[in-house]
Image (spheres, coloured by chain):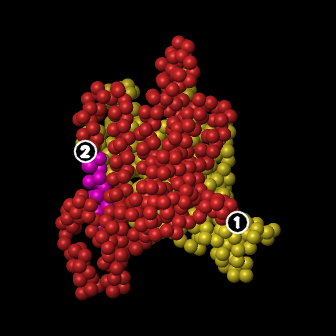
Chain colours: A yellow, B red
């Protein structure tokens, strides 16, 4: 490789890099399916309020538990509400909350991990012990406690989810930083007299970014699972807001004669989680990171 | 070697100590306490004072922590607020029931995961791999409460093969419990098996690509002899740790599954005690679940240490 071509590679714009990664992701069948499902759900989340045929909270006792028909595609639930309307609206809250939650997890987990990897020593030891302790408390217990005491508003859920799903990222970011910090280019940057900030910003972050991003994408799908579990248990979105987890838990008791009210949200939630998972997997493969031997902590 | 083991055990205790601090501080800073919840609207003045005195909440927090921790080490977690009975007695049968559920899932899950993982790795990218891997992705990603709900709908409601929800008292005998746990065990085992099978698969693939396996092939070692003698022992060792972490991570999923099936285990107790704001029970549960997590990890670490000859001679890994 000539010096010229190396130089050219560095000049690629961010947009070019991103589109290259997306093309690599979509070139595998699983990645293509995952991306399509995810894009479909995101578009649906944006347009669903405009295309929903009925009011999601309109209760109609005369229409209780109607089977699917031309008028009500997915039937109606125990309060006579249209299941189709509620299903296409049901992913919006979950998607929004978990998206911002993952961003927060990514930021604090990534930064704390890089920091710990850099400073090492006593501070690193203490922080990692605390992270370990948090890891050993089941997320569901901690989340339930917080939500039951502080309420289920978005302002509580996003930071709480962001915090509890970020602690695993700390370890990944720390390990990635350890890998980078021993490399020659850090030593030469030090020798060139670059400041610590410049080394972190220009040398370390670009090199650990991929690992942290992949971790964040994976967290997104787990967080979605966790958030839906909370909703399912009655500790997430409060009714009458349409939410898949909540809809499943409501319709579950009546599913022996109204299975449609439970199947529709199940398909919605499962497809979204599978979509995000496949996308995250393809993303990891496109960036050349093998996650399959890692435990979901 | 001995030093490593002692160090690992000590680290586990330190983690548990921090967990106890976190849960204690956490329940302190979050608004509301046992008395305000218990008395609701009457939580002021004389009555509140009396309640604080009765539950011993009038002494400084650090004193309460010390006395709570000293008792907890001896297995005494104090009294639960809702039922006013010793938490120890509430926990006992619940722990037993959850252990039955979890160990059944683990014992069914691990052999299946091993077989699936090895098959998919050896026939990589061929039909068995593609088929099994597709199924594992579904089993792995679909939330427990969805697979549990679907299992109830299909097997209990449509096919009427098994009872859908568990309606037994908490302290039921093992034999009476058995038909009730089949569906919950399937629900938990499914997701666990899928996670583990995936890890075993990539672990085996990594070893198959290593130089000594290539060497064995070149030497003309018969294929199956090579798989069993050279590949599997080396591939399964690193998998132990990951499997342990997965099992520990799934504790949260066990909680949800227990709720779906109305199973009288620790998971339902978690929900009940949180709904009742029964903070002493929540603290006890946090410590117990964290101890399970820490001991599973410890066990896995020790197993890897025992089984890996290379680590035996290693002194201290930093």
- The local crowd at label 1, few if under 14, some if 14 to 19, many if 20 or more residues have their Cα within 10 Å, is many
The image shows residue A84 at horizontal and vertical percentages of 71, 66
Q: Work out which residue is located at the far top of the displayed protein and give it.
A: B219
Above or below for A181 versus B276: above
Q: Is residue A153 left or right of residue B26?
A: right
Does the magenta run of residues contain A3? no
Position of the C terminus of chain B, as image quadrant, is: top left
Position of the N terminus of chain B, as image quadrant, is: top left
The image shows residue B254 at horizontal and vertical percentages of 48, 57
The residue closer to the viewer here, A160 or B25, is B25
The residue closer to the viewer here, B275 or A207, is B275
Alpha carbon distance from label 2 to label 1: 53 Å
Q: Is residue B262 visible?
A: yes
Q: Is residue A202 visible?
A: no
**Magenta: main secondary structure:** helix
* Residue for badge 1: A260
Q: Is residue B145 left or right of residue A198?
A: right
Mark sitting on residue B10: 2
Above or below for B245 versus A147: above
């Amino acid at each position: 490789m000539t010096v010229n071509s190396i130089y050219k590679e560095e000049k690629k714009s961010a947009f070019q890099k991103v589109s290259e990664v997306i093309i690599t992701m979509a070139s595998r069948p699983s990645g293509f399916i995952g991306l399509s499902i995810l894009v479909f759900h995101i578009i649906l989340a944006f347009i669903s309020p405009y295309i929903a045929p009925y009011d999601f909270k309109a209760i109609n006792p005369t229409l209780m538990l109607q089977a699917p028909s031309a008028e009500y595609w997915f039937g109606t639930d125990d309060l006579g509400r249209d299941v189709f309307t509620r299903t296409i609206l049901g992913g919006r809250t979950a998607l929004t909350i978990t998206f911002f939650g993952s961003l927060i997890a990514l930021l604090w987990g990534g930064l704390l991990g890089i920091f710990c990897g850099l400073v090492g020593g006593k501070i690193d030891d203490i922080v990692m012990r605390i992270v370990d302790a948090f890891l050993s408390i089941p997320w569901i217990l901690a989340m339930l406690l917080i939500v039951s005491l502080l309420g289920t508003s978005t302002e509580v859920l996003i930071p709480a989810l962001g915090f509890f799903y970020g602690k695993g990222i700390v370890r990944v970011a720390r390990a990635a930083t350890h890998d980078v910090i021993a490399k020659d280019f850090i030593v030469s940057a030090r020798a060139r007299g670059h400041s610590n900030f410049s080394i972190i910003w220009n040398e370390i972050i670009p090199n650990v970014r991929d690992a942290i991003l992949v971790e964040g994408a994976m967290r997104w799908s787990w967080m979605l699972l966790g958030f839906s579990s909370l909703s399912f248990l009655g500790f997430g979105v409060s009714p009458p807001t349409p939410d898949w987890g909540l809809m499943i838990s409501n319709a579950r008791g009546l599913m022996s004669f109204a299975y449609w009210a439970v199947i529709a949200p199940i398909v919605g939630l499962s497809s979204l989680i599978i979509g995000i998972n496949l996308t995250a997997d393809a993303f990891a493969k496109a960036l050349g990171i093998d996650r399959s031997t890692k435990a979901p902590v | 070697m001995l030093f490593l083991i002692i160090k690992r055990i000590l680290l586990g205790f330190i983690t548990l100590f921090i967990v106890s601090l976190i849960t204690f501080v956490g329940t302190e800073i979050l608004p509301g306490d046992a008395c305000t919840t218990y008395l609701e609207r009457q939580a002021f003045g004389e009555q509140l004072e009396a309640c604080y005195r009765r539950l011993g909440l009038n002494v400084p927090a650090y004193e309460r922590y010390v006395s709570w921790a000293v008792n907890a080490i001896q297995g005494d977690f104090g009294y639960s607020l809702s039922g006013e009975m010793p938490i120890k007695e509430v926990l006992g049968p619940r722990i037993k029931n959850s252990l039955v559920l979890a160990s059944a899932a683990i014992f069914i899950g691990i052999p299946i995961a091993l077989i699936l993982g090895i098959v998919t790795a050896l026939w990589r990218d061929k039909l068995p791999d593609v088929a099994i891997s597709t199924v594992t992705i579904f089993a792995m990603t679909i939330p427990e409460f969805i697979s549990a709900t679907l299992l109830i709908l299909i097997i209990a409601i449509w096919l009427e093969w098994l009872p859908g929800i568990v309606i037994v008292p908490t302290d039921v005998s093992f034999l009476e419990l058995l038909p009730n746990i089949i569906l919950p065990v399937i629900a938990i085992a499914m997701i666990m098996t899928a996670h583990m099978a995936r890890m075993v698969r990539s672990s085996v693939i990594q070893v198959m690509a290593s130089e000594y396996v290539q060497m064995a092939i070149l030497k003309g070692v018969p294929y199956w002899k090579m798989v069993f003698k050279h590949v599997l022992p080396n591939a399964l060792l690193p998998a132990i740790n990951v499997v342990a972490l997965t099992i520990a991570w799934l504790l949260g999923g066990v909680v949800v599954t227990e709720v779906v099936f109305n199973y009288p285990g620790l998971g339902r107790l978690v929900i009940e005690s949180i709904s009742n704001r029964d903070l002493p029970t929540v603290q006890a549960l946090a410590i117990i679940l964290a101890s399970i997590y820490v001991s599973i990890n410890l066990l896995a670490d020790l197993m890897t240490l025992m089984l890996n000859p290379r680590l035996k001679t290693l002194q201290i890994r930093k």
